Amino acid sequence: MYQLNFDLNEFLTTYWHKQPVVIKNGFIDFEDPISPDELAGLAMEEEIDSRFVTNLDGNWKAQHGPFESFDDFPDTHSQLIVQAANHWHPGLRELAQPFRVLPNWLFDDVMICLSMPNGGVGPHIDQYDVFITQGMGKRRWRVGEKGEYKDANHDSGLRQIEGFDPIIDEILEPGDILYIPPGFPHEGNTIDVSMSYSIGYRSPKKQELLSGLADYVLTNELGDVHFYDPNLQTRDEHGMIPTSESEALNDMLMKLINDPKIKARWLGEQLSQSRHELDIMAAEPPWQADELFQFIEDNMVLEKVSGMKALYHENDLSVVFINGESIELPEGCEAAARLLCDQEAFSGEDLGELASNPALLALLLDLCNQGYWYPQA
């Protein structure tokens, strides 16, 4: 079990969205949760997002996986990157556990970098919060101030910048953590063969929220109502839009956008969607009701698929949002929202009296058969 060596509440007060910081020995007695060979194996899988970046002689190139072999890849000036590794490897899931006290709707993924000497992706700027944990080896990290920077190496697809003056320039060793808020330029350069783990938190942009709401409205055929004015009068100013009519149109739009039921459903579905593939496998053969009931009776554990988001609104526990879907809980089963969403796993004992509710058991059976939860024997 991974254990942080600092208080997250104090960290949030001092650094979150404010300034970058290096936390020496941020993890107590850190050990790599995955080996380089295992990481290479993940990069060979079609479902997993991976990249291989090289910068020999200053010539930046990025290749996207899946990869069939790494025999021809250079052993210097290169870096293998795997996104959302926590979805596919239990050790990476455990690494993210100490950060579970942060909002799950913000959590993105655990990205891994296997870096050869002098490997990296160059100076760049990310728009998310990241805790970069150093595993085996050493890497030198430089971080600059927020500001306007010129883009560089457009053809590489790496979204690099030309450079920056560092406010942090340190070598990270196993267990050290570098926190970087959105908008701060940074660059990592590998000293010797190195593994690093980026635990990322990504908030939506205004554009994404507006686009997501518009898609939700169209998909669900909401707001299909025309402007209506029974008091319309003639006017000499044929091309004018009167203020009263402009305000009426704006009122139509605002009533749709601010409808609390529409907004709550859309936001829950939007925030519970994963940006990366999940290791979801439908049960085959499907679980039968009596099998699941016996499993729960024996106080066995149901575990959530790693990386899948399950959310609920603070003021309404009757609906949960799982992997982009709205699911209404059976009447009287509101307490199940906390089990499904706040916990990574729960047992028959955790269910308590809810275990005798046929409607809830039917829902759990459906979730298990879809592959969202799976029984741990």
Image (cartoon, rainbow, N blue to C red):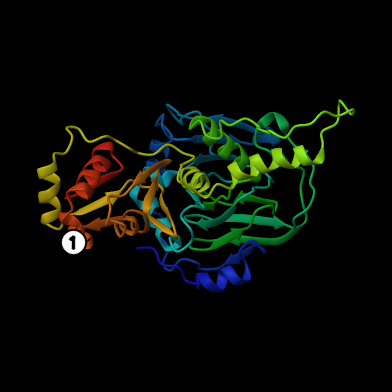
Q: Where residue 139 sits in the image (x, y, percent)?
A: 58, 54
Q: Quadrant of the N terminus?
A: bottom left
Q: Return the x and y of residue 2 as percentages of the image width and height.
A: 39, 63
Residue closer to the observer: 332 or 158: 332
In depth, the one of 71 and 50 nearer the eye is: 50
Q: Residue drawn at (50%, 28%), measured in percent from left and top?
A: 72
Q: Is residue 142 visible?
A: yes
Above or below — where is 360 with respect to 10? Answer: above
Query: In the image shown, does 310 or 193 lie closer to the viewer?
Result: 310
Percent coordinates x, y for residue 98 in the rendering: 42, 63
Q: What kind of element bears circle 1?
A: helix
Q: Amino acid at mark 1?
A: Glu
Q: How many other residues sit within 10 Å of disc 1, few (<14), some (14-19) or many (≥20)? A: few
228 up-or-down from 364: above or below: above
From the viewer's perspective, is 138 left or right of 149? left
Figure quadrant of residue 121: top right
Image point (68%, 38%), residue name: 159
Tell whether 169 sits left or right of 33.
right
Q: Decide if residue 97 is on the left or right side of residue 229.
A: left
For residue 34, say whether it is visible.
Answer: no
What residue would you read off at disc 1?
353
Question: Residue 85 falls in which quadrant of the image?
Answer: top left
Relative to the observer, which residue lies in front, 185 or 176?
185
Q: Residue at x 56, y 35 (%)?
A: 223
